[in-house]
Image (cartoon, rainbow, N blue to C red):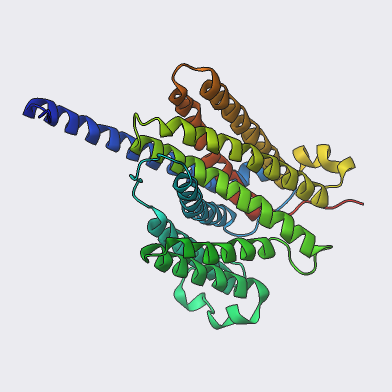
């Protein structure tokens, strides 16, 4: 027999759902605002007392780069988690609404903004007349910037198609372009540096995006026994991703800061200070992940692990903001 909910109860439930949705939207907006504020104000704080000078518009570039990283994380996380759920026996057919199209549009705008900076000789353009679009084709950085713009455009079209898995190609192109951009050809061992950055970015994007989509899926599956199984599966994958992010991060740091100068440069240079902040945040994320894992295994209700997991998403957002800022600061001096 089908039970019909009284109109008053249905109205209360609907109002409660709207309030929760509004609260989540406001929380996301507040988090994005804080991340943008951190990236905008971060350069002056990081550079204070170091004697270094930031490039023009470092704060804005940091924001755009952070937005670009976030736009990569969302669709990659969706594809990864949806792949996991398809392999889970007895998993519900319901899936949260995809945000890949919105992410691709946001990434396209961020990449377009970064390309406009490259088109003006790495200066912030104050008018359209200053932007030399044709000049982008004549430089390595310009070509990579255009590649990222086009890749996000194609990723958006793939997200709208019947084969969303085809997003992997253009998103992989963006990751590769970012890895190449971070290591110019004049650098010692640019290929090794690009490979390390590619693995680092890919694993970090999967970690952040997959955790976010896992929590969205659990909300969609509310009360279903497959929920704790999905969370446990993600926890095992996240441990591997954390190990890869840590290993590649340490190797990249030692390439730019020799071991005997790391401690000094972590406090005496803007890049080092920002890197130290990122390390502390990643350590906090690891502790939250451990807390979630303990709750998942030992708590009578495994879904109580969602509480530290939500906090983990928030701290990962801060990590993305710091990572964007890191790309806009002067590269540390490599003392031999």
Tally of numbered tags: 0
Which residue occupies the foreground of this view, 330 or 292?
Answer: 292
Image quarter (top left, top right, bottom left or bottom right) of the N terminus: top left
Looking at the picture, how far across and down is residue 110, in whole percent? 48, 61
Above or below for 245 versus 177 = above
Q: Which residue is drawn at 82% across and 52% down?
A: 255
Please, is residue 133 above or below residue 10 in the view? Answer: below
- The residue sitting at 51% across, 69% down in the picture is 151
Depth check, front residue: 94 or 309: 94
Q: Of 192 and 9, which appears nearest the observer?
A: 9
Q: In which quarter of the image is residue 265?
A: top right
Looking at the image, is 220 positioned above or below residue 13?
below
Towards the viewer: 86 or 241:
86
Residue 34 seen in the current view: no
Whether residue 169 appears in this view of the structure is: yes
Q: Is residue 294 rendered to the left or right of residue 92?
A: right
Q: Please state the horizontal and vertical placement of residue 87, each as a whole percent of the image.
A: 48, 46
Which percent across, then down, holds residue 36?
49, 46
Q: Residue at x 73, y 51 (%)?
A: 52
The percent position of residue 305, horizontal first and vertical second, equals 48, 25
Toward which corner of the image does residue 85 lie, by quadrant? top left
Residue shown at 64%/54% (left/top)? 327
In the orientation shown, which residue stands out farthest toward the left?
A: 7
């Amino acid at each position: 027999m089908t039970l019909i909910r009284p109109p008053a109860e249905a109205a209360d439930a609907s109002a409660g759902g709207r309030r929760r949705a509004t609260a989540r939207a406001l929380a996301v907006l507040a988090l994005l605002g804080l991340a943008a504020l951190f990236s905008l104000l971060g350069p002056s704080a990081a550079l204070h007392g170091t004697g270094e000078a930031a490039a023009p518009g470092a704060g804005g570039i940091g924001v755009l780069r952070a937005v670009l990283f976030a736009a990569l994380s969302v669709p990659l996380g969706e594809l990864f988690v949806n792949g996991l759920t398809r392999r889970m026996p007895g998993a519900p057919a319901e899936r949260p609404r995809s945000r890949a199209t919105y992410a691709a549009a946001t990434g396209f705008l961020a990449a377009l903004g970064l390309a406009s900076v490259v088109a003006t000789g790495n200066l912030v353009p104050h008018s359209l007349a200053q932007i030399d679009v044709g000049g982008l084709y004549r430089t390595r950085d310009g070509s990579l910037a255009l590649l990222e713009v086009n890749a996000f455009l194609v990723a958006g079209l793939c997200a709208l198609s019947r084969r969303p898995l085809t997003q992997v190609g253009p998103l992989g192109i963006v990751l590769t372009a970012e890895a190449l951009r971070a290591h110019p050809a004049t650098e010692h061992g640019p290929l090794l540096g690009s490979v390390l950055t590619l693995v680092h970015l890919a694993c970090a994007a999967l970690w952040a995006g997959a955790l976010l989509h896992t929590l969205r899926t659990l909300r969609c599956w509310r009360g279903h026994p497959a929920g704790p199984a999905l969370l446990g599966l993600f926890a095992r994958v996240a441990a591997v991703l954390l190990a890869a992010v840590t290993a590649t991060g340490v190797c990249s740091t030692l390439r730019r800061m020799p071991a005997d100068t790391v401690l000094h440069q972590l406090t005496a240079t803007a890049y080092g200070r920002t890197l130290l902040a990122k390390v502390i945040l990643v350590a906090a994320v690891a502790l939250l992940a451990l807390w979630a894992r303990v709750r998942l295994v030992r708590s009578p209700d495994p879904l109580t692990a969602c509480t530290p997991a939500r906090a983990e998403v928030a701290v990962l957002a801060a990590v993305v903001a710091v990572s964007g800022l890191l790309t806009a600061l002067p590269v540390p001096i490599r003392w031999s």
